[in-house]
Amino acid sequence: MGRAIGRLSRKAALITGGAGSIGLATARLFAAEGAKVMIVDLNESELARAAESIDGDAVRWTAADVTSSEQVGAAVARCVEQFGGLDVAFANAGIFGVVAPVTEYPVDVFERVMAVNVVGSFLVAKYALAVMTSGGSLIINSSVVGLTSDQGISAYATSKHALVGLMRTAAKEMAPKGIRVNSLHPGPTDNEFQHAIEIDAVGASREESARAFEQMIPLDRHAAPEEIARAVLFLAGDDSSFMTGATLAVDGGLSI
């Protein structure tokens, strides 16, 4: 991970999807860099385990459904109450859906993907940006398929492209207040979320499906969750102080 140097010292952060691999890796890195972190997810027991896995007392947790305006608003309010403010928000919660042609894609699944990925990120932006002050940073987790796409992933790709529009709009609105908004575009990452997608898309074993995806990536491998977390840290802290409205690809060259 590298030596921590306090890049987020005295900062307060909120991370949705905080019990998942990227969210948890980010929470762990943020805490190591001096931040107080509120992780948000659906499952209380998974949240508790995630928080307990991080050394020290920097991490708190609260359960919330990101599709609920009331619950997201309450999670942001709790973060402010616990830590005295909010400096960084990482809108990271997301789901994939299924692999199917547009003409056969289940409408209810499409709507659910849009609700979690798009409405969920919008609600994080709505409530987090309202309480941030100058120097704040919102990072919206999109995907490499928020820059590209492929067959069978209409819901996921549509939702991840939509996040770029949300990010760019918020970036323009927040710039006069000194608050930055950027989107992150990870490529295939070595976690259960990604491997389930690969098995669904390829229709082979986990290992065979993973290798099929790696053959499409110029760097010829999956990312580790910690590599994605380091990109989130970059966008959260002062190292990216002149970046807003940017789409940062962390995809091993997949979007080239």
Image (spheres, helix red, strand yellow):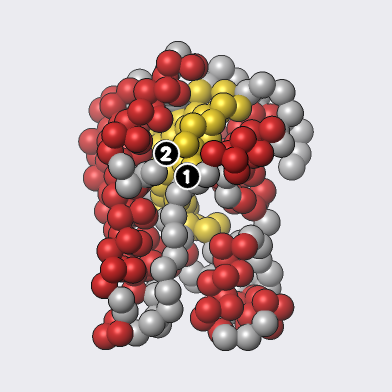
Determine which residue is flagged by label 1.
42
**In the image, residue 151 lies at what x, y percent?**
40, 82
**In the image, residue 71 lies at what x, y percent?**
34, 35
Quadrant housing residue 49: top right
The residue type indicated by label 1 comes to: Leu
What residue lies at 39% left-to-right and 43% top-to-bottom? 65
The residue type indicated by label 2 comes to: Ala
Q: Is residue 211 left or right of residue 122?
A: right
Give residue 64's mark.
2
Query: Is 158 above or below relative to 224?
Result: below
**In the image, residue 109 lies at what x, y percent?**
33, 68
Query: Is 120 above or below relative to 200?
Result: above
Quadrant housing residue 126: top left
The local crowd at label 1, few if under 14, some if 14 to 19, many if 20 or more residues have their Cα within 10 Å, is some
Do the residues under discs 1 and 2 have CB atoms within 8 angstroms? Answer: yes
What residue lies at 74% left-to-right and 42% top-to-bottom? 1
